[in-house]
Amino acid sequence: PRPVLYEYAEAVLLVAALLLASYLILRRRSRRAIFVLMLGALFYFGFWRQGCICPIGAIQNVTLTAFDNSYAIPLAAAAFFVIPLVFTLFYGRVFCGAVCPLGAIQDAVLIRPVRVPGWLESGLRLLAYTYLGAAVLFAALGGAFLICRYDPFIGFFRLSGNWNILMLGTSLLVIGLFVGRPYCRFLCPYGVILRHLSRLSKQRVTITPNECIKCRLCEDACPFGAIREPTEDWPEGEYKIAKRRLALFLVLVPVLIAAGGWAGYSLKDRFARVHPTVRTAERIYLEETGQVAGTTDVSDAFRATGQTSALLYREATGIRNQFAAGGALLGAFVGFVAGGKLVVLSVRRRRTDYEADPASCLACGRCYKYCPKEQERWKKTRSMGAAR
């Protein structure tokens, strides 16, 4: 195990990187400087530290700590989980913009971004909520650390790994040539948490440094679809249709929750088989009933403990019951999120200027150079520097 002092040092380094990112994104407003910091974070937290430990995977450590009294969360895992959340509350998604190695490796390959329709992006984002719920469920019940097991880029950082995971990561990077940060936007479970916290941030990315002149130059500047246009008044006919649609979706929400809960409950056996105790019990049962010939290392190890198969079966049944309840909760959660998305898509918010949506904005700084007001600011800054 690494010395505690070393873990403190890494936490301090993370804080320093986030402070620098906050300054570059919100004060200096320099895409070039943000990109350089992003590459540095990719090298250190990605390739040098081999992607471990990261805030995304720390979700599982925090969950296991909450549900298992015998587990003590490592200091580094707790720090890496909490620190980016605190910065997000104050400065928006600066961690995503310049410090996260998973985001950096995708950002580095983006060459020709295409626009994803808003309705499609919202639907695809449901995958991230499902992934978050599943990761919490399996970590809480001791089944597996899904986020670490299926990390698509860890194989690149460690220059080795499971072939299927390497292919998954390669596929995401190929998609990432044209669709900005697909993992961040549609799969990242930590990103789900950051999305909601960033709505509360005291400071956040603004396209213009002062006032919006509605020049429309920034409309297509964001590769992540985070720029929101000014809204117009609804025609009376469209407004009435929208009200009826909203009422329908509000009625549909409990239906989706119930359907999701039933679907999650019906998957209880598949979920439970991820747990090693359940798999061991199934193997022992097959051997004792003569349905398979021979033994395995797992069944031999179980018999060496001297534990009776009856006790093993009771433990496995208890775990199945836990996964039945947990699966129902997971399904209900996904149904609730799906219903909520339908409701949100039916609500029209008033905007007078072009704005970066705080939840969707990944703080990459690409939009700055499109704003004439930002260009004026830079000219003034350079002229003041030359005068000195």
Image: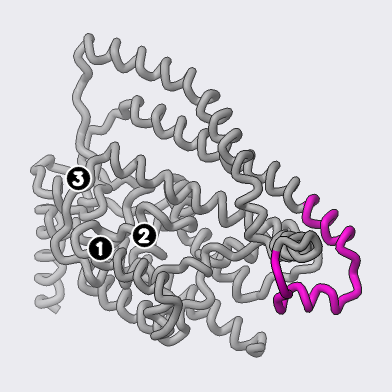
**What number is the disc on residue 211?**
3
Task: Identify residue type, mark 2.
Answer: Tyr
Classify mark 1: helix, strand or loop. Answer: loop
Name the residue beneath numbered marker 2: 183
Mark 1 or 3, nearer chain start: 1
Task: Identify residue type, mark 1.
Answer: Gly
Q: Residue at x 55, y 70 (%)?
A: 80
> Is there CB contact under 8 Å for labels 1 and 2?
yes
Q: Which of marks 1 and 3 is in front?
A: 1
In the image, the segment drawn in magenta is 292-318
Task: Answer whether residue 294 is magenta in the image.
Answer: yes
Name the residue beneath numbered marker 1: 176
Residue 19 visible to an observer of this rendering: no
Q: Position of residue 201 (x, y in %)?
A: 44, 50
Task: Identify residue type, mark 3.
Answer: Glu
Label the magenta part by its dominant secondary structure.
helix
Mark 1 or 2, nearer chain start: 1
Q: Nearer the viewer, mark 2 or mark 3?
A: 2
Horizontal side of residue 19 vs 1, given as left or right? left
Quarter holding residue 140: bottom right
CA gap between label 1 and label 2 equals 9 Å
Q: Where is residue 89 in the image (x, y as percent from the top left)?
A: 48, 54
Horizontal side of residue 366 vs 299, given as left or right? left
Is 93 in front, or is 67? 67
